[in-house]
Amino acid sequence: SVSVAEKAGTIVRDVFNSGELGVVEKGGKNDLQTQADRSAQECIVQSLSRQFPKVTIIGEEEPTDEVVDESHLETGLSEEVLKAVCPQDLQAVKDEDVVVWVDPLDGTKEYTEGFLDHVTVLIGVAVNGKAVAGVINQPYYNYKAGPGATLGRTMWGIVGLGAFGVERLVPPADKRIVTTTRSHSNKLVTESIEAMQPDEVLRVGGAGHKVLLVIEGKAHAYVFATPGCKKWDTCAPEAILHALGGKLTDIHGNALQYHRDVKHPNTGGVLATYSDHDWYLGRMPESVKAAVKP
Ligand SMILES: Nc1ncnc2c1ncn2[C@@H]1O[C@H](COP(=O)(O)O)[C@@H](OP(=O)(O)O)[C@H]1O
Ligand SMILES: [Mg+2]
Ligand SMILES: [Mg+2]
Ligand SMILES: [Mg+2]
């Protein structure tokens, strides 16, 4: 999944450079799909399913009936990952017990508007309904740093092993910074954010991007108290956050489930923090909790 996510990230950049985004409205102007979503999904689902035919793979986008572009496939394996030792409790897992949740492009709305660093490719691995491993590729990491900088990065982690390609940084202690959606806000989102009495609110795109802000200390919490986010948005980021000691739950404090037959929406919303998780849960207004049921 690490090498596959990297390949998908190059596809995301290639489509943007081609200038032909091929935007389709799936469910209104805020629920878009581009050629990059379609091609990156093809890359990930085809590459993984050919190598691991017994694994269940669930992607955000509907499969198209187009002929598979073989140049989109990745069969290489990451040396860095192969060197790691799988945690004891995952060594006996069978292919049939694995569910992979794929978000080929998280932050599509922002991608079409040029907020390129909000975009990530997410591949989450679940076993027995739990997010146990994740890969995040951020294709436009460093794109504002000038032509000399290396563009893009890949982060991965396994619960019980740790995370690589990303480092936990501590946020400022003298203020509270909360991050939430930029393009899918509503009254519940606004009310819950206000209840957290933030000094600063970062309204940015992408679930993967927002969890990265929490991991890297740019925000104390990611608060999204409404349905809308799906399992493929949270599986990979949750696994990496958990591998680093953070916490991602719904807004009631329940763990998210990732079984193959689970309903796709995270109907109970999303709360991700590094510390003081219970404090955020406690400040969640009763009216919001009543409206956002798991
Ligand atoms: N009301 C809604 N309808 C459809 N998708 C939503 C949604 N609210 C959130 N999402 C999805 O959740 C992800 C994170 O949302 P946001 O960037 O607003 O925080 C995005 O994933 P995609 O970009 O992969 O579709 C977005 O589409
Ligand atoms: Mg989408
Ligand atoms: Mg998404
Ligand atoms: Mg997506």
Image: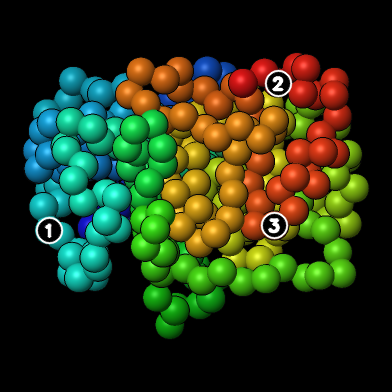
Residue 257 is situated, as x and y percent measured from the top left of the image, at 46, 29
Give the structural element (helix, strand or loop) at label 1. Answer: loop
- In this rendering, the label closer to the viewer, 1 or 3: 3
Q: How many marks?
A: 3
Residue at 50% x, 46% y: name it. 238
Horizontal side, residue 99 vs residue 219: left or right: left
The residue carrying mark 1 is: 76
- In this rendering, the label closer to the viewer, 3 or 2: 3
Label 1 Cα neighbours within 10 Å, binned few <14 / some 14-19 / many ≥20:
few
Residue 252 is situated, as x and y percent measured from the top left of the image, at 69, 30
Q: Quadrant of residue 53?
A: top left
Give the structural element (helix, strand or loop) at label 3. Answer: loop
Q: Earlier in the sequence, mark 1 or mark 3?
A: 1
Q: Which mark is residue 98?
A: none
Identity of the amino acid at label 3?
Ser
Residue 16 is situated, as x and y percent measured from the top left of the image, at 39, 50
Q: Earlier in the sequence, mark 3 or mark 2?
A: 3
Residue 14 is situated, as x and y percent measured from the top left of the image, at 31, 53
Q: Quadrant of residue 80?
A: bottom left
Identity of the amino acid at label 2?
Val
Tell me: is circle 1 under 8 Å from ligand 4: no
Q: CA distance from mark 3 to mark 2?
A: 23 Å
Position of 247 relative to 101 (above/below): below
Q: Disc 3, disc 2: CB below 8 Å?
A: no
Horizontal side, residue 274 vs residue 259: left or right: right
Query: In this view, which residue lies farthest toward the front?
Result: 88
The residue carrying mark 3 is: 275
The residue carrying mark 2 is: 292
